Amino acid sequence: MNQKVDVSVEKALLAEITSELPLTILERFSTLVRESGSEDERIAADYLAGFLKDWDVPHQIHTPDLYLSVPKKSSLHVTAPLEKEYRIKSPSFSVITGDEAITGEVVYIPTGYAKGINDIFGADNPKDMGDLTGKVILTEGFPMPGKVQEFTDKGAAAILFISPGNNIHEGICTTIWGAPDLTNIHDEPGIPVMAINKPDGQELSALCEQGAVHVTFKTNLEKGWFSCPIIDIFIEGTEEPEKYVLLHGHLDSWHEGIGDNATGNAALLEMVRILHSNRDKLKRSVRVAIWTGHSTGRYGGSTWFADEFGLDLEKNCIASVNCDSPGCRWATSYDHMMWMSEVDEFCTDVVKDAVNLPSKGGRPLRAGDYSFNNIGITSFFMLSSTIPESLLNEKGYYPVGGAAAILNGIQKKTGCM
């Protein structure tokens, strides 16, 4: 990894970076709710493609049908010991009740909140939870597939997760990566899953401690196959043009999603602009992919891409570099980065060279469009940086696995877990 490089070329490319294009993209995307399969997502893809056309950058827009689950309005009504409506959301791939109201008794099972990003994806349920058959489980945390499956196996009729803040976080609760196949088609969650904010969840848990609590609920989602745009850009190198680095990030988002991932889209387009205008200096090629189906399909776009171009990726892709949530406010720590072990020295050198800070990288979580592991492609980065732990504690923020890996109780979740 310690090969000599022409630093003059690097300096020249860095000198071309401006904020003009990124700010233009961020301003436009701040008006779009880029939910996968939506008109706003198509508008966003066309907007980015417009720059590529103006620059004569070779690109394609694929429009695969992706298997998605898009949350709509769900509801929860406490019927005893009092009458009260609570605002809830259902994560992607919850079972849909539709117009049918389901009733049940709530049982509070305390499981606590994640202490760090690595805890978010695991299930840490009490060993002795009693008979949960037919119960509506109330517990803390995000609706992660591990917890959902464990409570399902215990016979629960539904699960209500208490978000760690004042807002309800979006999420997805299936284990299936991309579209299901014959080996995992039955692994979708088998019960309704819901989420409630922390104050309301605490109120419900207090009611449970006083006696029996009964609820009626409905979960509404739109599940099926959605035509979604995927932008595929190819900037050809001069010596081994068939070999390329795959640089990628997702286009879709919960809500406006500026930190996750409009900043990534803006960064990708600025890199495309500069690399294309300096393509005569590239020995190998750069392929840039901007996915959809990230948030409501558990990386449906990148999974489709891996299936569609698997043989070419195995033969020609040198490395996969993820660009998700760069430039988030206060995110100045590089202690929780992700990369494969074979590029540890390379990645720490890159961070040191770029920002003159130390960094630590761990084995990538099964997240963030790491859809190429089975092909054996070396991959690195995901969240570009995180907020230092001391500042996290000072601000009372908590891990979410989305924009800058943190949020507090008054911000809305705009990423994918």
Image (tube, grey):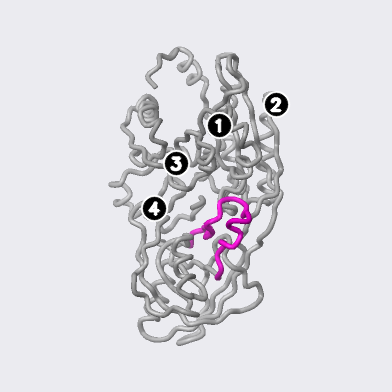
Q: What main secondary structure does the magenta stretch of the protein show?
A: loop
- Viewer-nearest of discs 2 and 4: 4
Q: Position of residue 155 (x, y in %)?
A: 48, 75
Give the SS element for disc 3.
loop
Instruction: Please report the bounds of the magenta region as a residue range.
Output: 168-191
Mark 2 touches mark 1? (CB < 8 Å): no
Amino acid type of the residue that numbered disc 4 sits on in the rendered structure: Pro
Q: Position of residue 14 (x, y in %)?
A: 48, 21
Give the mark nearer the N terminus: 3 vs 1.
1
Give the SS element for disc 2.
helix
Q: Distance of mark 2 from mark 4, alpha carbons?
A: 40 Å
Q: Quadrant of residue 408?
A: bottom left
Q: Distance of mark 3 from mark 1, alpha carbons?
A: 16 Å
Residue 383, labelled with which disc? 3
According to the picture, the residue beneath numbered tag 4 turns out to be 399
Amino acid type of the residue that numbered disc 2 sits on in the rendered structure: Asp
Compared to 162, does 180 lie above or below? above
According to the picture, the residue beneath numbered tag 1 turns out to be 246
Compared to 402, does 6 lie above or below? above
Q: Distance of mark 3 from mark 4, alpha carbons?
A: 13 Å
Amino acid type of the residue that numbered disc 3 sits on in the rendered structure: Leu
Give the mark nearer the N terminus: 3 vs 4.
3
According to the picture, the residue beneath numbered tag 2 turns out to be 54
Compared to 332, does 76 lie above or below? below
Q: Position of residue 211 (x, y in %)?
A: 39, 86
Give the mark nearer the N terminus: 2 vs 1.
2
Taking the spot 48% from the left edge, 47% from the top edge, the residue there is: 367
Give the mark nearer the N terminus: 2 vs 4.
2
- Viewer-nearest of discs 2 and 3: 3
Give the mark nearer the N terminus: 2 vs 3.
2
